[in-house]
Image (cartoon, coloured by chain):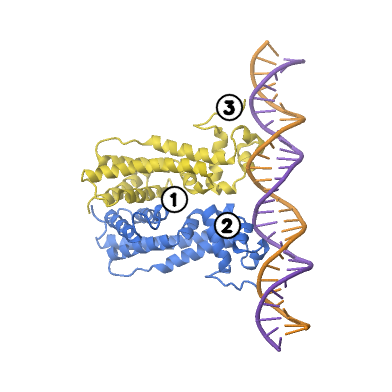
Chain colours: A blue, B yellow, C purple, D orange
Amino acid sequence: MARTQGSHAGTTGPKVRDAALRLFARHGFAAVSMRQIAAEVGVQAGALYLYTADKQTLLFELMRDHLHDLLQDWTPPGGGPLRELEDFARHHIRYHLDRPELVFIAYMELRNLSPENFAVIEGLRRDYENRLEAVLRDGVAEGVFEVPDPKLATMGLISMLTGVTTWFRDGGRLSRGDVETIYWDMVRKSVTAG
Amino acid sequence: MARTQGSHAGTTGPKVRDAALRLFARHGFAAVSMRQIAAEVGVQAGALYLYTADKQTLLFELMRDHLHDLLQDWTPPGGGPLRELEDFARHHIRYHLDRPELVFIAYMELRNLSPENFAVIEGLRRDYENRLEAVLRDGVAEGVFEVPDPKLATMGLISMLTGVTTWFRDGGRLSRGDVETIYWDMVRKSVTAG
DNA sequence: CCTTGAATTGAACGCTCGTTCAGATACGCT
DNA sequence: AGCGTATCTGAACGAGCGTTCAATTCAAGG
């Protein structure tokens, strides 16, 4: 039997996954060949098919497992909407800064998914958005937040927070903690009365 | 002489540009062949080279002209930082909602640019960011804004505002004007005292 | 109708692509 | 040592890639 490398939650072996992750993030799914991935693993192209069904599945499993992990990373901690929103914002930033390559792929390669795979990924993403939206709605109901449209605010906040991956670099002017705190401050002000 | 189609600011004819724009936005630069672009124009592949130097140039000119237009679309209108920030936010949203395909390409295809072309595009993008940053710095200097790090705030706001293209659809629950106003409200609150 | 030059075709070049598979190799066990 | 199985190679398949260019078609002016 092949496929003995095991994997996170799919059928693709971890060595192949990691190589694909690096290359897809750097050059893009469509620009990376199976032969390049094989070379990165240190194997001939044919051997990849012992560890993954095909190229499309490789991409899908990277994205699916990423979103699965993201959803597992955060559940509402209680303590009121304000505290939950801060927790969400800080977790989101941490999680995304820890996995810039996966984040990049999950945003950029959506259109390279087959329709069925796309539907799955889109659903997972919506689940995540809905969690933030629920926090915002709770806050509005409790009078803590002043948000005319929670769905729009959700999209705006997630865009803002996720954008951190496009410019943040370790060792720069600001630490991760600085960034977390400053972003949280902007988030808080943007959804409370002003 | 060929290349008689003329063009916006480059050497590529408009029919070819528009076809490439549509296809690159839908399927991605690397996944679209010159033959597909030619078919969209209604011509054989060889004829494309009368209207563009090569595929890389096609992508570069789309992005360069897009950013050039974006920079021309807005200059500080005066009237104080708050008024300027509102003007910026509204222009940014309008401009991006009017050109979702170009915006998409300009964000997604950066890594498919040659190093020299990438440097040009990155410079134009930084010029745009610097304009917003200048407004924020002015506002801090005048005591209108409360922003601990104008550069970070710039990146956060642009991410948030640009993200509108990922979910907004005409004919949906909110009009463009609604979206503009709600986003502006979030932007304003996030950079003023709270 | 004929000429002239621009516009376009269609074939070709050398190359890479994802995927398959028969055969070779390496490894664990007795 | 020898067997059985897991792992991997290397060649092959048909297809598509960006780009070039000789040859052809087209449009307009005389």
Image spot of residue B3 (x, y percent): 59, 29
Image spot of residue B171 (x, y percent): 42, 46
Vertical comparison of C4 with A66: above or below: above
The residue most toward the left is B143
Image spot of residue A82 (x, y percent): 28, 63
Badge 3 amino acid: Thr
Per the image, the residue denoted by label 1 is B166
Q: Tell me, yes or no, whether the two marked residues, 3 and 1, touch with CB atoms within 8 Å.
A: no
Q: Secondary structure at mark 3?
A: loop
Count residues near mark 1 (Cα–Cα under 10 Å), then give few for <14, some for 14-19, many for 20+.
Answer: few
Per the image, the residue denoted by label 2 is A114
Image quarter in which the C terminus of chain B is found: bottom left
Which quadrant holds residue B33?
top right
Which quadrant holds residue A10?
bottom right
Q: Is residue B89 left or right of residue A125?
A: left
Task: Pinpoint the chain carrying mark 2.
Answer: A
How far apart marks 3 and 1 lie (CA) works out to 36 Å
Per the image, the residue denoted by label 3 is B4
